[in-house]
Amino acid sequence: MSELPKLSVIGTGYLGATHAVSMVELGYEVIGLDVDQAKIDLLRAGKVPFFEPELPELLEKHVNGGRLRFTTDYAEVAEFADVHFVCVGTPQRPGELAADLTYVEAAFRSLAPHLDRRALVVGKSTVPAGTAVRMEALLQDLAPNKEVELAWNPEFLREGFAVQDTLRPDRLVLGVHSDWAEKTIRSAFEPVIKAGTPVVVTDFATAELVKVAANSFLATKISFINAMAEICETTGADVTQLAEAIGHDARIGRKFLNAGLGFGGGCLPKDIRAFIARAGELGVDQAVSFLHEVDSINQRRRARTVDLGLDLLDGSYRGAKVAALGAAFKPNSDDIRDSPALDVAAAIGRREGQVMIYDPQAIETARAKQPELNYATSLEDALDGADIVFLLTEWDEFKFMHPGVVGKLVAQRKIVDGRNVLDPVQWRQAGWQYRALGRP
Ligand code: UGA
């Protein structure tokens, strides 16, 4: 092995594409693989197939620089790299709580038979506890070189901050079974470790669990503050002030205490559900039964948002022009997986509201999933003649709207702030009927 190992990244979705390009930025030679030829063609042309700040510039910088290439060929990957990062998705199985491991298994089964020299395979995908040992056995079965080893290295990047989180992660978690595996994976993160990133070296089961535990904690924190919002709504208290006040306690912390429409995306919702399913299989359902509650508090916020609008429209959406601001599950992303914003817009549509959705980045992804809804090409188009406005994703473009300017575009000054980002005093002074989650 030369000084820095050569890397492969298998799966070029959000995680894989970001990991591949960031590792080149850190000085490595990297090959990215995907079974989707269209995705590979885009990446080869220097185009990122999804919206992620900073990534397009970084890809453009490196795509023709000689240290980054893309392929659909597992044999090429096996020949090239010393360390293989498996970054494929583990979505929720349709109609079930459990995660679908088809792509993880397929990646291991496709790669292993080509591994005829010493190599480290590193699992990065979010998986139920017990998956890594199964993948280790699979490698031992299918790889011609019996010195192929496995490590588990969960990923904690956030969409919208994916590049920063990869170049400067909070911590590295390395699940390993041998000194060689530890030494090798450390060499694959050398610049990150040298920069002072804390490293936790552990076993496979712990490495797998750290990831789902972290996401469960974050989801619980959000649902906790949203449960407080429910109480605030019946007592006349203000959840944003409550969050600020408890957040000053360093043991609690202010982050992830933003009450509103709740969490969505491709990770938090499916990870807590997969955790519930896995705990059930292991016979420890009770240990995570609170996650059912976390999930249902989260879902209730969506229904409550729809109800707030109903209050403002005297009990019916029928025929009302509704401006839905936001489709992405959070700002700085075009991801609409399990998006609370899109869910609320669709629910209002089912109640015969004439919904017009605008999002700065997620119109195309939203239209692909929900073609029956209407999409505006600009904020002004969405607001034009609206009887009610819903702020559903807290993009800056919406956070900094001026109530007077917006007031001139709409038919009625009625707004539901689903993310608690507007100043109620300012909007009410401008003649708006303002409603929010957890605030009087
Ligand atoms: C989440 C984790 O934060 C990452 O650490 C993890 O790596 C990732 O999942 C993953 O498993 O891959 P992400 O899904 O990108 O990252 O988004 P977050 O920033 O965690 O936000 C999740 C949802 O919670 C969003 O819908 C957001 O609007 C909502 N949220 C967040 C709140 O409702 N309130 C808050 O205070 C914070």
Image: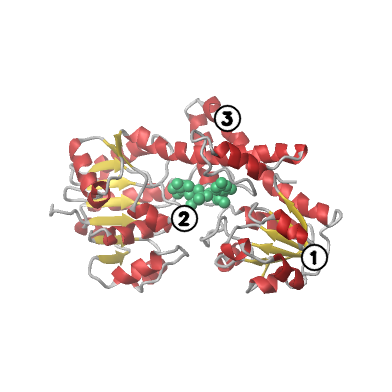
Which residue corresponds to the image point at 63% horizontal and 74% vertical from the top-left?
377
Q: Measured from the top left, where is residue 198 in percent x and y?
A: 31, 41
> Which of pointers 1 and 2 lies earlier in the amino acid sequence?
2
Q: Which residue is mark 2?
A: 159
> Mark 1: which secondary structure?
loop
Camera-side residue of 232 and 67: 232
The earlier-in-sequence mark between 1 and 3 is 3
Please name the residue shown 46% across and 36% down the image. 213
Describe the element under mark 2 as helix, strand or loop: loop
Q: Is residue 227 above or below residue 370?
A: above
Q: Nearer the viewer, residue 178 or 355?
A: 355
Q: Amino acid at mark 1?
A: Asp
Q: Position of 262 compared to 29: left or right?
A: right
Q: Residue 33, located in which quarter of the rendered image? A: bottom left
Write down the residue under mark 1: 387
Say whether mark 2 is within 8 Å of ligand 1. yes
Q: Residues within 10 Å of mark 2 (few under 14, many from 20)?
A: many
Residue in the foreground of this view, choosing between 323 and 345: 323
The residue at the point 51 percent across, 41 percent down is 218
Q: CA distance from mark 2 to mark 3?
A: 28 Å
Rounded to the nearest angstrom, the CA distance separating label 1 from label 2 is: 33 Å
Q: Position of residue 21 (x, y in %)?
A: 32, 62
